[in-house]
Each structure stands twice: as structure tokens, then as C-alpha cells.
Amino acid sequence: MLTGDDRGPGREWAYDDLGTRLVGRYIRWHESVPSTNDIARRLAEIPVPEGTVIGAEEQTAGRGRWGRSWASPRGGVWLSVILRPGLPPDRTPVVGFAAAVAAAEAIRETTRLPARVKWPNDVLVEGRKVVGILAEAAPGAEWVVVGVGINANVPQEALPRTPGYPAASLQVLLGHPVDRGALIRALLRRLDRGYELLRSSGVRAVLTRWREVADTLGRQVCIETPGGQMVGLAQDVDETGALLVRCDDGIVRTVTAGDLRVRERER
């Protein structure tokens, strides 16, 4: 079990009936924290057992990619998992892909909503963002912390206003609250299976599964990258998770980071 006064108040337990091999075997749950990823990163250095989950009813300083703020009010699912995949540093982004697939599968299982994944690892339902993933690795990739944020029972007025892909919650889309406990259990089970697939069969197997639920491939996209805007056809991803885009000039370019949206005529 996790112990230590320096981690603040929280409930902790071993989840023996979850049915997982690794993920969620130890869980520590808080009422309110700045960021579950920040706590998990500190714990990963101790180290605590692989698969440990840090969760919270709310985050007061949740963040997404590029250091952006991620609204995390009560009613959502906010958790981080500590993993040690033993991957080369350039392959660690694939852990985030596995988490996105797990989140999409968990939503489909518990709500029947048609969840799909937008590159690299946002989960959309009917073109609206319901899940964000933030995977952070140690400098030498000794560990990876993957944070998952699901807008479960978040009311419309508490959702952030975002351009491109507006945010939604499962409650708003369904018209009624979801069973958060069932959703969390499904998420951890699905992530456990995806992580086992990664460890046993490698990144290609995970990316094959990602392609099956991807909403991006085969579509005309516009990507804002650090080097400028890129427009073209999203063809595939490589083994690092980078997106391969056939640009309008016919050249296939590799995109490792950027904000993607489907071009209006394709939506």
C-alpha cells in the first residue's frame, strides 16, 4: 500500500476484485488535488508499484498538452497511472495511444456512445471532445505517467469553451448521469489489457488497435504545428505515433506534435 504523510490526505486500497493484472492493483483517491499527474510523477521516483493509480474527485490545476489548463470539476473522472514500459524514449508516446483506445472502449462499453479517437489521443463523441490524455515520461523513459480526464457527469455550464472541437460530457450527450464507478472500472480493465498488449506484442499491436478506433485517418486535416500550418490527407501513423500527412504538394510529411482539426468540407 502507499504510505507517507508527505502525500497529503487520501483514501488508498488494493483493488483485488478489479480483475486486472497490473493497472489499478493499488489506488489512492483524493477529494481535491492540483494535478493527479504531478502526484504520480513524484511517486514514480520513489518508486511505488507499477500500475498504481492516483485519482481525485476534482483537480484545481489540471493540465493538458502544451501546458494548457484542463477544467476538472467534480463529476468527471480524473486519474493518472504509473507505468514502466521499458520502451525507447521515442516510443513512449504510444502509451498515450493505448490509454486513448482504452478510454474509447470503456465509454462504448458503459454508455454505447460511438467514441472515436482523434490523433494523437483525444476521444470524441459526435465530434465533441469528452476525453483528454496526457502522457509524461521521465527523461530516460524509466517511467511513464499517463493521465486520463473524462468529462463524465460534468454539467454543460462547467465545460470549457474551446474552438474546433467543443467539449461535451457523457451526461450531456446521454441526457442522464453515467455510473462513474462502472466507467472507472471499465477504463482500468481496458487500459490493463492494452498495456499487456503493448508489453507482449509491442507498439505495432497497439497502433493497429488505435487505427481501428481512429477518427483521423483517411481524412483531410489542417494541423497547427510549431513550424506553421500543414494541410493534407492524414494517411497513417508511424511506430512513434507521429502522423503521416500527404500534403497538397504531394509530399508525405511527418507530424510529431500539433493541434489537428478535420477540414470543414470533410466534417
Image: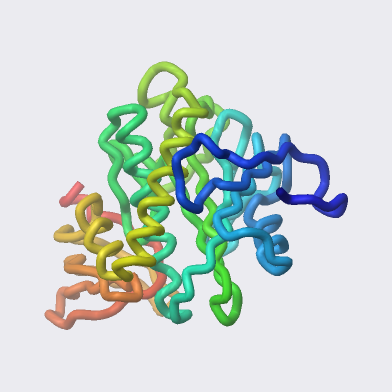
Identify the residue at image location x=65%, y=50%: 36
Extreme-top residue of the structure: 176
Left or right: residue 160 compared with residue 104: right
Give the image quarter of residue 81.
Answer: bottom right
Is the residue 157 above or below the residue 134 in the image?
above
Identify the residue at image location x=57%, y=75%: 142
Percent across and percent down for residue 28 are 68, 44
Left or right: residue 84 compared with residue 205: right
Total marks placed = 0
Identify the residue at image location x=40%, y=43%: 129
Is the residue 33 above or below the residue 76 in the image?
below
Which of 160/26 is in front?
26
Give the image quarter of residue 99.
Answer: bottom left
Give the image quarter of residue 170.
Answer: top left
Percent across and percent down for residue 257 are 41, 71
Is the residue 256 above or below the residue 265 in the image?
below
* Colour mode of the rendering: rainbow
Percent across and percent down for residue 123 are 37, 47
Identify the residue at image location x=83%, y=52%: 4
Percent across and percent down for residue 53 are 60, 49
Left or right: residue 207 compared with residue 13: left
Which of 54/51 is in front?
51
Left or right: residue 52 compared with residue 256: right
Extreme-front residue of the structure: 16
